[in-house]
Every structure is written in C-alpha cells, then in structure tokens.
Amino acid sequence: MADLRFSTEWLSVGNSEPFLRETSGQLSIYLGDNCLTRNEDVWSKTVRDTVLVSTYPLAMWFASSWWRLNYEPLPKFGIKPQLDWRMSHELGAANHGFVWPRILFAADGEAVNIWAEAANTKGQSITYLHGLESQQSVSIANFQSRVGAFIESVLSRLAAVECAQSDLRELWSLVQEDSDNPDALRIRQLEALMGFDPEECPEPTMAEALRIQDQIGVGAMSELAPVFGRRAQVVALDDIVELASMQGIIGEPISDLDGAKKVSSVPWQQGVEVARQLRQHIGNEDGPIGDDILFSLLGITKHQVESFNIGSNRVASVAKSRGDGKFDFIPRKKHPLGKRFEFARFLGDCLSRSEQGGGWLVTSDLTTARQKRQRAFAAEFLCPIQALVNFLDDDYSESAIEEAVDHFHVSDKTIESLLANHGYLEMSSVEPRLPYRLAA
C-alpha cells in the first residue's frame, strides 16, 4: 500500500481572519511517489509541488469528516453519490475560496482508497497537473496517522501564534475522546456506515442498528449498513429485519481448506489465491465448474436453487448462519449466469471471511474489500484466467468471448473484466479510472 504524506512551509499572509492567516503556507500532498499538489500558477507561469493555501479549512474538513472518511464506503462505482456523501469524501469540499486538488477518499473496511485527477478549471489561478492513473490505497492506520499528524501540525501552529483556542481544537478533541471510548467508537462507526455525521442519526434508528449488529455480526453489519442506511434521507433497516425473518435455501458449505495459505494483503489477490487453492483441493485446476460441483461445495442442490422463489428485487444477498455450520442462503439474482456468480461469491465469502460464529455472509454491489475479494474469487474459480487465455488463444474478438461465455458459463462482463485486470484488454474499455466525475 502507498504512504500518504503532508508537508507545510508556514507563511503568515494576506487574510484578516487570524485562523486563516496564521495557518497559511506552501502545502504539499504526496501519495507514494505521486505529488497530488503539483501545479502550475496560471499568473506567474511557474510549476511547483506546493500550493499556497490556508491549512485551517483543510484540517477542519478532515476533522469534521473523520468518521465517514474512515468507515463509509463508496456507494456504487460509476454512479455519482448524493451531495452529502461527496461533501464528506471529496477534498475540494474544504472550499473556503481556495483551489484544492481533486482528490477522493473512500474507505473499504480494510483500507482507504484514493483517486485523484488533474484539474484545469477555467478562470482559476491554479492548474493541478497530476492525478493518479488508477486507484491507490493506504492502510487505515496510515490514513489516521498521517491525517491526524496534519491536524496536529495545524493546531501546533495556532498555539505557536497564540491562537490555541479554536473550533478545530474543540472538534479534534471530540474525535479523540470518541476514539478512546469503545461504546462511542461503535456508535460513530455505525453512524458513518449508514451515512450520518456524528450525532445526526436519530436515537431510535441507532438503537435498532446496534440491536441488528448484535444479531448478525459486526462484519455483516459493516456490509449491510451502507446498503440499507440513509438513502434519500430514508433509513431502511426494516429491510434487514425482513431478511432475518425469511427462510432461505439451507446448506452446509465447505468452510476450510487444508493447508490453505494467505499470501497477499490485497483483497482481490486474496480472492484469487483462495479460488486457486479450492480448485486444487477438488482436483480441477482449469476446467469448467458445473452447477452440481458449485452447489455441492455449498451443501445445496441445483433443484433447491431453481425452485427457490427470488421474489422482489433486493439490493443485497445474505446467508444467515444457523450456528451449526449450516446457512440459510437468500439469493437475489435471477439470470442463470448471475446465480452461478452469486453463489460462487457466497462460497468465497465463506472461505475468506475473518468473522467466525454467527456472522452472516453478505454479497452486494458495494466496493468494500470483502466484496472485492468475493468477486475476484468467483471470477477466478468459475473462469481461471490462465485457462481463459489458453481457450481464447490470442483471439479477443467478440465472437471468441461469446464462445468463452458458453464454455465457462460466466457472463461476458466477467470475462472482459478478467482480461482487462490481467492486461489482455485495455482497462479503459471496461472500467473508468475514476468512480465518477469529480466536481470542478
């Protein structure tokens, strides 16, 4: 993972507001070797890695958005989220009249993912020259350490110029107090996962969320709260309660692989590793996986799957632990290929999850680490990349991909994503570099 770094050369310049004036300086932001503040001053025609801003509004934005930045995931790739989400995740929301780089932060449960793009806005004095070619990630520990140190540096600067008492000091003290209190921390995390700022979630809603979390497990609630949390100002926790009352397809999936090893720390690579280990375990390293084999690994039958009434459209699928190694599977996909991929994701979640005991399995359209791991497992297990490349034999035409769809029984989207992710197709033809167009 990358390392996020902030550096400020302090200057006391040009503002009547002391908090803004005394925290002005040349700011640089680095992510690994990438300077995200490299810019051209349109007026002076100079290029530098630092930008002259007041750091106070940026520190205030980080402190006020702290919980959502650390715990709230991207709702869905390719669709612009609601404004309140963007205000808590796009660095440009620090505003205060300064031209900020276009940087987006979104947690995935295990890391903070970062996107950035060059920015050339008509009429602005600064043009940011560098973005990121693709998403990069920093560990949550790195993010908290580096952003926390940046906030502390701004507070130290204020103390040095005899402006110690500030809204930033008060806000950051509250963040630290809640971080040190396990009960408060649990509430702040759930608020953020559901899309609320601190103390914004109604008390009855929070009480119900805590009760559900105790029932389904912390890991499962981390996946379901963003899906059923605040959507257009409505919280749909009743949908989780309804899932809890539904009867699904009862099965007892394989839950362990003898001698399995976890090598990578990257979620999608972990999914691929487990898929390859499972194929080795069942003695089929590159051939198609039939429905009977797939479902037998979950302890269910094809007849159970085909006779199950999917019902109304749902935004997530779950498998509820019965406490005896068995699960109630409640799928949502109706197309045969979609069903196969969904049940393969359940299988990957069962083999990869860290939470044991009563926690539910969850599949959704989120881009959390858990969902990335599931998707990568399902793709590699149903359609191993090397077997796919051998089957296509350097022919990546539409007709060849259609033949691969029939051979491996996966969707054309799955095949195109596999080929793009491994460099056989242009990534831009499958997935854009940014999850959505950032604000100007």
Image (cartoon, rainbow, N blue to C red):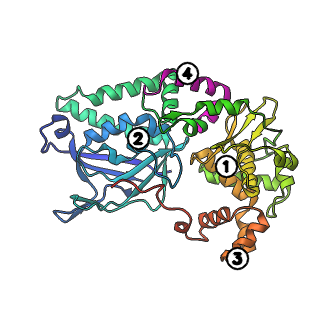
Instruction: Say whether disc 2 or disc 1 marks the residue closer to the N-terminus.
Output: 2
The numbered disc on residue 207 is 4
- Asked if residue 72 shows in the view, the reply is yes
Residue 203 placement (x, y as % from top left): 49, 21
Along the viewing direction, whichever of 12 and 305 lies nearer the viewer: 305
**Magenta portion: prevailing SS class:** helix
Task: Name the mark nearer the viewer: 4 or 1.
Answer: 4
**Distance from the alpha carbon under mark 4 to that under mark 1:** 30 Å
The part of the image, by quadrant, that contains residue 198 is: top left
Q: Which residues are magenta?
A: 199-223
Q: Residue at x 70, y 30 (%)?
A: 244
Residue type, label 4: Ala
Task: Name the mark nearer the viewer: 1 or 3.
Answer: 3
The numbered disc on residue 374 is 1
Task: Tell me if mark 2 has few (under 14), some (14-19) or many (20+) residues whose alpha carbon lies within 10 angstroms of its own.
Answer: few
**Distance from the alpha carbon under mark 2 to that under mark 1:** 29 Å
Q: Residue at x 78, y 46 (%)?
A: 259
